[in-house]
Amino acid sequence: MVEELLWIWRRMIENGIEPNLFTYNIMMDVLVNSMCIESAEKVFDVMEKGRVRPDVVTYNIMIKGYCKSGKTRDAKGKLREMEMKRVGPDKITYLTLIQACYSEEDIASCVSLFNELVEKRLEIPSHAYSLVISGLVKEGKCYEGFAVFDCMVKNGCKANVAIYTALIDALAKSGNGEEAMKFFERMKDEGCEPDEVTYGVIVNCLCKTGKLDLALEYLKFGHEKNIRVNAVVYSSIIDGLGKGGRVDEAEKLYEEMLDKGCTPDSYCYNTLIDAFTKCGKIDEAVTLFKRMEDVGCDQTVYTYTILISGLFKEHKTDKALEMWDMMIDKGITPTPASFRALSTGLCLSGKVARACKILDELASMGVIPETAFEDMIHVLCKAGHIKEACELADGIVDRDHETPGRVRTVLINALRKAGNVDLALKLMQSLIGMQYDRWGSIKTRDKFRNLFES
Protein backbone atom coordinates (compact mmCIF):
# COMPACT_ATOMS: atom_id res chain seq x y z
CA MET A 1 0.00 0.00 0.00
CA VAL A 2 2.66 2.44 -1.16
CA GLU A 3 0.30 5.29 -2.10
CA GLU A 4 -1.41 5.14 1.29
CA LEU A 5 1.97 5.08 3.02
CA LEU A 6 3.15 8.21 1.21
CA TRP A 7 -0.20 9.93 1.91
CA ILE A 8 0.22 9.28 5.66
CA TRP A 9 3.80 10.58 5.54
CA ARG A 10 2.71 13.80 3.82
CA ARG A 11 -0.07 14.28 6.42
CA MET A 12 2.50 13.85 9.20
CA ILE A 13 4.73 16.55 7.64
CA GLU A 14 1.74 18.90 7.13
CA ASN A 15 0.82 18.52 10.78
CA GLY A 16 4.35 19.18 11.97
CA ILE A 17 4.94 15.60 13.09
CA GLU A 18 8.34 14.42 11.95
CA PRO A 19 8.80 10.62 11.82
CA ASN A 20 11.58 9.15 13.95
CA LEU A 21 14.51 7.21 12.48
CA PHE A 22 12.78 3.84 12.93
CA THR A 23 9.69 5.05 11.04
CA TYR A 24 11.80 6.54 8.24
CA ASN A 25 13.71 3.30 7.81
CA ILE A 26 10.51 1.24 7.68
CA MET A 27 9.11 3.58 5.04
CA MET A 28 12.37 3.47 3.00
CA ASP A 29 12.42 -0.33 3.13
CA VAL A 30 8.82 -0.59 1.89
CA LEU A 31 9.53 1.78 -1.00
CA VAL A 32 12.70 -0.06 -2.03
CA ASN A 33 11.03 -3.48 -1.81
CA SER A 34 8.22 -2.11 -4.00
CA MET A 35 10.89 -0.83 -6.45
CA CYS A 36 9.76 2.78 -5.92
CA ILE A 37 13.38 3.94 -5.98
CA GLU A 38 12.67 7.57 -6.91
CA SER A 39 10.24 7.92 -3.98
CA ALA A 40 12.84 6.36 -1.68
CA GLU A 41 15.40 8.92 -2.92
CA LYS A 42 12.99 11.78 -2.09
CA VAL A 43 12.45 10.45 1.43
CA PHE A 44 16.23 10.09 1.83
CA ASP A 45 16.75 13.73 0.73
CA VAL A 46 14.13 14.91 3.26
CA MET A 47 15.98 13.03 6.00
CA GLU A 48 19.30 14.64 5.09
CA LYS A 49 17.77 18.13 5.28
CA GLY A 50 15.85 17.45 8.49
CA ARG A 51 16.73 16.73 12.07
CA VAL A 52 16.63 12.92 11.69
CA ARG A 53 19.72 12.00 9.70
CA PRO A 54 20.19 8.71 7.81
CA ASP A 55 22.06 6.01 9.70
CA VAL A 56 23.81 2.86 8.43
CA VAL A 57 20.45 1.05 8.09
CA THR A 58 19.05 3.87 5.93
CA TYR A 59 22.11 3.82 3.67
CA ASN A 60 21.98 0.02 3.41
CA ILE A 61 18.34 0.20 2.32
CA MET A 62 19.18 2.81 -0.33
CA ILE A 63 22.17 0.78 -1.55
CA LYS A 64 19.95 -2.30 -1.76
CA GLY A 65 17.47 -0.32 -3.85
CA TYR A 66 20.14 0.87 -6.29
CA CYS A 67 21.53 -2.66 -6.62
CA LYS A 68 18.09 -4.15 -7.23
CA SER A 69 17.41 -1.61 -9.98
CA GLY A 70 20.77 -2.20 -11.66
CA LYS A 71 22.31 1.11 -10.56
CA THR A 72 25.43 -0.39 -9.04
CA ARG A 73 27.49 2.74 -9.70
CA ASP A 74 25.01 4.82 -7.64
CA ALA A 75 25.18 2.17 -4.90
CA LYS A 76 28.98 2.49 -4.80
CA GLY A 77 28.55 6.27 -4.65
CA LYS A 78 26.41 5.88 -1.53
CA LEU A 79 29.20 3.85 0.10
CA ARG A 80 31.68 6.69 -0.52
CA GLU A 81 29.09 9.19 0.75
CA MET A 82 28.81 7.19 3.97
CA GLU A 83 32.55 7.50 4.51
CA MET A 84 32.45 11.26 3.87
CA LYS A 85 29.60 11.74 6.36
CA ARG A 86 31.25 9.43 8.87
CA VAL A 87 28.49 6.85 8.82
CA GLY A 88 30.40 3.61 9.25
CA PRO A 89 29.40 0.91 6.71
CA ASP A 90 28.81 -2.56 8.15
CA LYS A 91 29.04 -6.10 6.80
CA ILE A 92 25.56 -5.81 5.19
CA THR A 93 26.70 -2.75 3.21
CA TYR A 94 29.63 -4.62 1.72
CA LEU A 95 27.79 -7.90 1.20
CA THR A 96 25.03 -6.15 -0.76
CA LEU A 97 27.58 -4.44 -3.01
CA ILE A 98 29.69 -7.60 -3.47
CA GLN A 99 26.55 -9.52 -4.48
CA ALA A 100 25.62 -6.84 -7.04
CA CYS A 101 29.12 -6.73 -8.53
CA TYR A 102 29.25 -10.53 -8.72
CA SER A 103 25.92 -10.57 -10.58
CA GLU A 104 27.40 -8.14 -13.10
CA GLU A 105 30.57 -10.29 -13.35
CA ASP A 106 32.64 -7.37 -12.06
CA ILE A 107 34.99 -9.60 -10.07
CA ALA A 108 37.64 -6.88 -9.70
CA SER A 109 35.15 -4.73 -7.73
CA CYS A 110 34.12 -7.79 -5.68
CA VAL A 111 37.73 -8.33 -4.62
CA SER A 112 38.28 -4.63 -3.94
CA LEU A 113 35.19 -4.42 -1.70
CA PHE A 114 36.17 -7.65 0.04
CA ASN A 115 39.63 -6.21 0.78
CA GLU A 116 37.99 -3.10 2.28
CA LEU A 117 35.90 -5.38 4.47
CA VAL A 118 39.06 -7.12 5.69
CA GLU A 119 40.94 -3.83 6.26
CA LYS A 120 38.09 -2.43 8.36
CA ARG A 121 38.17 -5.63 10.45
CA LEU A 122 34.45 -6.12 10.07
CA GLU A 123 32.87 -9.53 10.40
CA ILE A 124 32.99 -11.26 6.99
CA PRO A 125 29.81 -13.19 6.14
CA SER A 126 30.35 -16.69 4.72
CA HIS A 127 28.38 -15.67 1.62
CA ALA A 128 30.91 -12.91 0.91
CA TYR A 129 33.70 -15.51 0.98
CA SER A 130 31.62 -17.72 -1.33
CA LEU A 131 31.03 -14.96 -3.89
CA VAL A 132 34.66 -13.80 -4.00
CA ILE A 133 36.09 -17.32 -4.19
CA SER A 134 33.60 -18.33 -6.92
CA GLY A 135 34.35 -15.14 -8.85
CA LEU A 136 38.11 -15.65 -8.70
CA VAL A 137 38.03 -19.29 -9.83
CA LYS A 138 35.62 -18.41 -12.66
CA GLU A 139 38.27 -16.04 -13.96
CA GLY A 140 40.86 -18.79 -13.72
CA LYS A 141 42.54 -17.24 -10.66
CA CYS A 142 42.70 -20.50 -8.74
CA TYR A 143 45.59 -19.55 -6.43
CA GLU A 144 43.91 -16.28 -5.42
CA GLY A 145 40.72 -18.22 -4.69
CA PHE A 146 42.59 -20.61 -2.40
CA ALA A 147 44.28 -17.66 -0.67
CA VAL A 148 40.82 -16.27 0.24
CA PHE A 149 39.80 -19.78 1.37
CA ASP A 150 42.85 -19.96 3.68
CA CYS A 151 41.96 -16.52 5.05
CA MET A 152 38.43 -17.76 5.75
CA VAL A 153 39.68 -20.86 7.60
CA LYS A 154 42.09 -18.77 9.71
CA ASN A 155 39.22 -16.49 10.70
CA GLY A 156 37.28 -19.50 11.96
CA CYS A 157 34.59 -19.30 9.29
CA LYS A 158 33.31 -22.70 8.13
CA ALA A 159 33.22 -23.25 4.38
CA ASN A 160 29.85 -24.12 2.85
CA VAL A 161 29.09 -26.53 0.01
CA ALA A 162 29.21 -23.75 -2.63
CA ILE A 163 32.77 -22.76 -1.64
CA TYR A 164 34.05 -26.33 -1.65
CA THR A 165 32.37 -27.06 -4.98
CA ALA A 166 33.83 -23.95 -6.63
CA LEU A 167 37.37 -24.88 -5.50
CA ILE A 168 37.01 -28.55 -6.48
CA ASP A 169 35.81 -27.44 -9.92
CA ALA A 170 38.76 -25.03 -10.24
CA LEU A 171 41.25 -27.80 -9.42
CA ALA A 172 39.61 -30.20 -11.86
CA LYS A 173 39.56 -27.67 -14.71
CA SER A 174 43.22 -26.79 -14.14
CA GLY A 175 44.16 -30.46 -14.61
CA ASN A 176 44.72 -31.26 -10.91
CA GLY A 177 42.26 -34.16 -10.75
CA GLU A 178 43.95 -35.87 -7.81
CA GLU A 179 44.01 -32.66 -5.77
CA ALA A 180 40.33 -32.14 -6.59
CA MET A 181 39.48 -35.58 -5.21
CA LYS A 182 41.56 -34.93 -2.06
CA PHE A 183 39.70 -31.67 -1.52
CA PHE A 184 36.43 -33.54 -2.00
CA GLU A 185 37.42 -35.99 0.75
CA ARG A 186 38.42 -33.07 2.99
CA MET A 187 34.99 -31.54 2.40
CA LYS A 188 33.25 -34.72 3.60
CA ASP A 189 35.64 -35.14 6.55
CA GLU A 190 34.73 -31.64 7.75
CA GLY A 191 31.06 -32.55 7.78
CA CYS A 192 30.02 -30.60 4.69
CA GLU A 193 27.55 -32.74 2.74
CA PRO A 194 28.02 -32.63 -1.07
CA ASP A 195 25.01 -31.61 -3.16
CA GLU A 196 24.02 -32.43 -6.76
CA VAL A 197 26.34 -29.72 -8.14
CA THR A 198 29.32 -31.13 -6.22
CA TYR A 199 28.66 -34.63 -7.52
CA GLY A 200 28.36 -33.21 -11.03
CA VAL A 201 31.79 -31.59 -10.70
CA ILE A 202 33.35 -34.79 -9.31
CA VAL A 203 31.84 -37.00 -12.00
CA ASN A 204 32.99 -34.60 -14.73
CA CYS A 205 36.50 -34.57 -13.22
CA LEU A 206 36.68 -38.37 -13.14
CA CYS A 207 35.43 -38.66 -16.72
CA LYS A 208 38.04 -36.20 -18.00
CA THR A 209 40.82 -38.14 -16.26
CA GLY A 210 39.59 -41.43 -17.75
CA LYS A 211 38.30 -42.88 -14.45
CA LEU A 212 34.94 -43.87 -15.92
CA ASP A 213 34.25 -46.84 -13.63
CA LEU A 214 34.78 -44.65 -10.56
CA ALA A 215 32.50 -42.01 -12.11
CA LEU A 216 29.79 -44.66 -12.53
CA GLU A 217 30.25 -45.65 -8.87
CA TYR A 218 29.71 -42.04 -7.79
CA LEU A 219 26.60 -41.89 -9.97
CA LYS A 220 25.26 -45.02 -8.26
CA PHE A 221 26.19 -43.61 -4.84
CA GLY A 222 24.32 -40.40 -5.66
CA HIS A 223 21.18 -42.42 -6.46
CA GLU A 224 21.51 -44.32 -3.17
CA LYS A 225 21.78 -41.01 -1.28
CA ASN A 226 18.64 -39.74 -3.11
CA ILE A 227 20.65 -36.90 -4.63
CA ARG A 228 18.95 -35.61 -7.77
CA VAL A 229 21.24 -36.33 -10.70
CA ASN A 230 20.84 -33.73 -13.45
CA ALA A 231 21.44 -33.85 -17.20
CA VAL A 232 24.95 -32.39 -16.83
CA VAL A 233 26.12 -35.38 -14.75
CA TYR A 234 24.65 -37.91 -17.15
CA SER A 235 26.08 -36.04 -20.15
CA SER A 236 29.59 -36.05 -18.62
CA ILE A 237 29.56 -39.84 -18.20
CA ILE A 238 27.92 -40.46 -21.58
CA ASP A 239 30.59 -38.27 -23.18
CA GLY A 240 33.37 -40.13 -21.34
CA LEU A 241 31.98 -43.55 -22.27
CA GLY A 242 31.55 -42.49 -25.89
CA LYS A 243 35.11 -41.19 -26.17
CA GLY A 244 36.35 -44.37 -24.49
CA GLY A 245 34.62 -46.51 -27.13
CA ARG A 246 32.08 -47.87 -24.64
CA VAL A 247 29.11 -46.87 -26.78
CA ASP A 248 26.72 -49.62 -25.65
CA GLU A 249 27.17 -48.50 -22.03
CA ALA A 250 26.65 -44.87 -23.07
CA GLU A 251 23.38 -45.81 -24.80
CA LYS A 252 22.25 -47.80 -21.76
CA LEU A 253 22.98 -44.83 -19.49
CA TYR A 254 20.98 -42.59 -21.81
CA GLU A 255 17.97 -44.94 -21.48
CA GLU A 256 18.41 -44.94 -17.67
CA MET A 257 18.43 -41.15 -17.76
CA LEU A 258 15.07 -41.15 -19.59
CA ASP A 259 13.59 -43.74 -17.20
CA LYS A 260 14.47 -41.54 -14.20
CA GLY A 261 12.64 -38.60 -15.77
CA CYS A 262 15.79 -36.56 -16.43
CA THR A 263 15.36 -34.57 -19.65
CA PRO A 264 18.43 -34.64 -21.92
CA ASP A 265 19.75 -31.29 -23.14
CA SER A 266 21.54 -30.45 -26.41
CA TYR A 267 24.91 -31.29 -24.92
CA CYS A 268 23.74 -34.75 -23.87
CA TYR A 269 22.27 -35.52 -27.29
CA ASN A 270 25.38 -34.19 -29.03
CA THR A 271 27.72 -36.36 -26.95
CA LEU A 272 25.75 -39.51 -27.73
CA ILE A 273 25.38 -38.63 -31.43
CA ASP A 274 29.15 -38.05 -31.54
CA ALA A 275 29.77 -41.45 -29.92
CA PHE A 276 27.48 -43.18 -32.44
CA THR A 277 29.12 -41.53 -35.46
CA LYS A 278 32.63 -42.38 -34.28
CA CYS A 279 31.84 -46.08 -33.99
CA GLY A 280 29.98 -46.22 -37.31
CA LYS A 281 26.42 -46.30 -35.92
CA ILE A 282 25.26 -43.50 -38.20
CA ASP A 283 21.63 -44.70 -38.39
CA GLU A 284 21.33 -44.56 -34.59
CA ALA A 285 22.87 -41.07 -34.65
CA VAL A 286 20.29 -39.87 -37.20
CA THR A 287 17.47 -41.41 -35.11
CA LEU A 288 18.66 -39.42 -32.08
CA PHE A 289 18.85 -36.30 -34.23
CA LYS A 290 15.20 -36.76 -35.22
CA ARG A 291 14.24 -37.39 -31.59
CA MET A 292 15.79 -34.04 -30.64
CA GLU A 293 13.45 -32.37 -33.09
CA ASP A 294 10.44 -34.34 -31.83
CA VAL A 295 11.00 -33.32 -28.17
CA GLY A 296 11.81 -29.68 -29.05
CA CYS A 297 15.50 -29.83 -28.07
CA ASP A 298 17.64 -27.29 -29.95
CA GLN A 299 19.79 -28.76 -32.70
CA THR A 300 22.92 -26.61 -32.63
CA VAL A 301 25.53 -26.03 -35.31
CA TYR A 302 27.65 -28.56 -33.42
CA THR A 303 24.90 -31.20 -33.82
CA TYR A 304 24.91 -30.71 -37.59
CA THR A 305 28.72 -30.67 -37.75
CA ILE A 306 28.93 -34.06 -35.99
CA LEU A 307 26.36 -35.64 -38.31
CA ILE A 308 27.80 -34.16 -41.51
CA SER A 309 31.24 -35.50 -40.61
CA GLY A 310 29.78 -38.91 -39.68
CA LEU A 311 27.72 -39.21 -42.87
CA PHE A 312 30.76 -38.46 -45.03
CA LYS A 313 32.77 -41.13 -43.19
CA GLU A 314 30.06 -43.64 -44.11
CA HIS A 315 30.23 -42.40 -47.75
CA LYS A 316 26.69 -40.98 -47.55
CA THR A 317 27.58 -37.82 -49.43
CA ASP A 318 24.05 -36.93 -50.57
CA LYS A 319 22.70 -37.30 -47.01
CA ALA A 320 25.52 -35.10 -45.68
CA LEU A 321 24.66 -32.40 -48.23
CA GLU A 322 20.97 -32.67 -47.29
CA MET A 323 21.97 -32.15 -43.64
CA TRP A 324 23.99 -29.05 -44.63
CA ASP A 325 21.06 -27.60 -46.61
CA MET A 326 18.71 -28.31 -43.68
CA MET A 327 21.04 -26.38 -41.36
CA ILE A 328 21.14 -23.39 -43.72
CA ASP A 329 17.33 -23.47 -44.24
CA LYS A 330 16.82 -23.36 -40.45
CA GLY A 331 18.90 -20.18 -40.25
CA ILE A 332 21.74 -21.78 -38.30
CA THR A 333 24.96 -19.94 -39.15
CA PRO A 334 27.78 -22.28 -40.19
CA THR A 335 31.08 -22.08 -38.32
CA PRO A 336 34.59 -22.65 -39.71
CA ALA A 337 34.45 -26.12 -38.08
CA SER A 338 31.18 -27.05 -39.80
CA PHE A 339 32.49 -25.95 -43.21
CA ARG A 340 35.72 -27.84 -42.55
CA ALA A 341 33.68 -31.02 -41.97
CA LEU A 342 31.75 -30.40 -45.19
CA SER A 343 34.73 -29.43 -47.36
CA THR A 344 36.83 -32.35 -46.08
CA GLY A 345 34.07 -34.80 -46.98
CA LEU A 346 33.50 -33.24 -50.40
CA CYS A 347 37.21 -33.13 -51.24
CA LEU A 348 37.67 -36.78 -50.32
CA SER A 349 34.55 -37.62 -52.36
CA GLY A 350 36.02 -35.94 -55.44
CA LYS A 351 33.62 -32.98 -55.27
CA VAL A 352 36.11 -30.14 -54.86
CA ALA A 353 34.16 -27.84 -57.19
CA ARG A 354 31.03 -28.30 -55.05
CA ALA A 355 32.98 -27.32 -51.94
CA CYS A 356 34.24 -24.16 -53.69
CA LYS A 357 30.70 -23.29 -54.79
CA ILE A 358 29.36 -23.63 -51.24
CA LEU A 359 32.24 -21.49 -49.97
CA ASP A 360 31.22 -18.74 -52.42
CA GLU A 361 27.63 -19.02 -51.16
CA LEU A 362 28.87 -18.59 -47.58
CA ALA A 363 30.77 -15.45 -48.56
CA SER A 364 27.51 -13.90 -49.80
CA MET A 365 26.04 -14.70 -46.34
CA GLY A 366 28.92 -12.87 -44.64
CA VAL A 367 30.50 -16.13 -43.39
CA ILE A 368 34.15 -16.33 -44.47
CA PRO A 369 36.23 -19.16 -42.95
CA GLU A 370 39.74 -17.69 -43.08
CA THR A 371 41.66 -20.95 -43.62
CA ALA A 372 39.09 -22.72 -45.81
CA PHE A 373 41.23 -23.10 -48.94
CA GLU A 374 44.30 -23.91 -46.90
CA ASP A 375 42.41 -26.70 -45.09
CA MET A 376 41.11 -28.11 -48.39
CA ILE A 377 44.59 -28.21 -49.94
CA HIS A 378 45.97 -29.97 -46.85
CA VAL A 379 43.14 -32.56 -46.93
CA LEU A 380 43.71 -33.32 -50.62
CA CYS A 381 47.49 -33.65 -50.20
CA LYS A 382 47.11 -35.88 -47.15
CA ALA A 383 44.76 -38.16 -49.11
CA GLY A 384 47.24 -38.31 -51.99
CA HIS A 385 45.06 -36.29 -54.39
CA ILE A 386 47.95 -34.06 -55.46
CA LYS A 387 46.60 -33.18 -58.91
CA GLU A 388 43.27 -32.06 -57.41
CA ALA A 389 45.18 -29.98 -54.84
CA CYS A 390 47.14 -28.26 -57.61
CA GLU A 391 43.96 -27.59 -59.62
CA LEU A 392 42.35 -26.11 -56.51
CA ALA A 393 45.44 -23.94 -55.94
CA ASP A 394 45.20 -22.64 -59.51
CA GLY A 395 41.49 -21.92 -59.05
CA ILE A 396 42.15 -19.96 -55.85
CA VAL A 397 44.64 -17.68 -57.62
CA ASP A 398 42.56 -17.33 -60.82
CA ARG A 399 39.58 -16.13 -58.79
CA ASP A 400 41.74 -13.61 -56.88
CA HIS A 401 40.99 -15.26 -53.52
CA GLU A 402 44.69 -15.38 -52.56
CA THR A 403 48.04 -14.14 -53.82
CA PRO A 404 50.08 -16.71 -55.80
CA GLY A 405 52.96 -16.52 -53.31
CA ARG A 406 50.79 -17.43 -50.32
CA VAL A 407 49.08 -20.32 -52.17
CA ARG A 408 52.50 -21.60 -53.23
CA THR A 409 53.68 -21.61 -49.58
CA VAL A 410 50.50 -23.39 -48.45
CA LEU A 411 50.93 -26.08 -51.12
CA ILE A 412 54.60 -26.63 -50.25
CA ASN A 413 53.74 -27.04 -46.55
CA ALA A 414 50.83 -29.36 -47.38
CA LEU A 415 53.05 -31.60 -49.54
CA ARG A 416 55.73 -31.68 -46.85
CA LYS A 417 53.26 -32.57 -44.06
CA ALA A 418 51.74 -35.29 -46.26
CA GLY A 419 55.21 -36.87 -46.56
CA ASN A 420 55.65 -35.96 -50.23
CA VAL A 421 59.00 -34.22 -49.69
CA ASP A 422 60.24 -34.73 -53.26
CA LEU A 423 57.32 -32.81 -54.79
CA ALA A 424 57.60 -30.13 -52.09
CA LEU A 425 61.29 -29.61 -52.97
CA LYS A 426 60.52 -29.63 -56.69
CA LEU A 427 57.89 -26.92 -56.22
CA MET A 428 60.20 -24.90 -53.96
CA GLN A 429 63.06 -24.99 -56.46
CA SER A 430 60.87 -24.14 -59.48
CA LEU A 431 59.14 -20.96 -60.62
CA ILE A 432 55.76 -22.68 -60.60
CA GLY A 433 53.07 -20.45 -59.09
CA MET A 434 55.34 -17.38 -59.03
CA GLN A 435 54.55 -14.27 -61.05
CA TYR A 436 57.43 -13.06 -63.19
CA ASP A 437 58.14 -11.12 -66.42
CA ARG A 438 58.61 -13.63 -69.19
CA TRP A 439 58.29 -11.20 -72.12
CA GLY A 440 59.34 -7.88 -70.73
CA SER A 441 56.32 -6.08 -69.31
CA ILE A 442 53.79 -8.94 -69.45
CA LYS A 443 53.42 -10.67 -66.09
CA THR A 444 52.64 -14.38 -66.23
CA ARG A 445 53.03 -17.49 -64.11
CA ASP A 446 53.29 -21.23 -64.48
CA LYS A 447 50.20 -23.10 -63.30
CA PHE A 448 50.50 -25.34 -60.25
CA ARG A 449 49.20 -28.24 -62.32
CA ASN A 450 52.44 -27.99 -64.32
CA LEU A 451 54.19 -29.54 -61.31
CA PHE A 452 53.46 -32.95 -62.86
CA GLU A 453 54.50 -31.98 -66.37
CA SER A 454 57.81 -30.22 -65.68
Image (cartoon, rainbow, N blue to C red):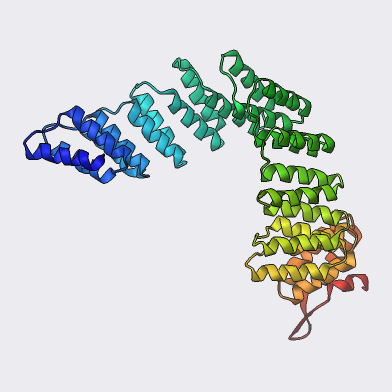
Q: Residue at x 11, y 39 (%)?
A: 11
Q: Residue at x 68, y 60 (%)?
A: 334
Q: Is residue 225 left or right of residue 88?
A: right
360, above or below 169, in the image: below
Q: Does residue 430 appear in this view? A: no
Q: Does residue 139 appear in this view? A: yes
Q: Position of residue 318 (x, y in %)?
A: 84, 63
The answer to which quarter of the image holds residue 256 is top right
Exactly how many numbered labels are in the figure?
Answer: 0
Out of 3 and 245, give the one closest to the viewer. Answer: 3
Q: Is residue 196 left or right of residue 30?
A: right
The residue positioned farthest toward the right in the image shown: 453
The answer to which quarter of the image holds residue 404 is bottom right
Q: Position of residue 232 (x, y in %)?
A: 66, 36
Q: Position of residue 280 (x, y in %)?
A: 87, 47
Instruction: Give the quadrant of the C terminus.
Output: bottom right
Q: Position of residue 269 (x, y in %)?
A: 72, 44
Q: Is residue 288 left or right of residue 81?
A: right
Instruction: Give the quadrant of the N terminus.
Output: top left
The residue positioned farthest toward the left in the image shown: 16
Q: Residue at x 85, y 61 (%)?
A: 317
Q: Is residue 276 left or right of residue 205?
A: right
Out of 36 and 79, give the one closest to the viewer. Answer: 36
The answer to which quarter of the image holds residue 435 is bottom right
412, above or below 41, in the image: below
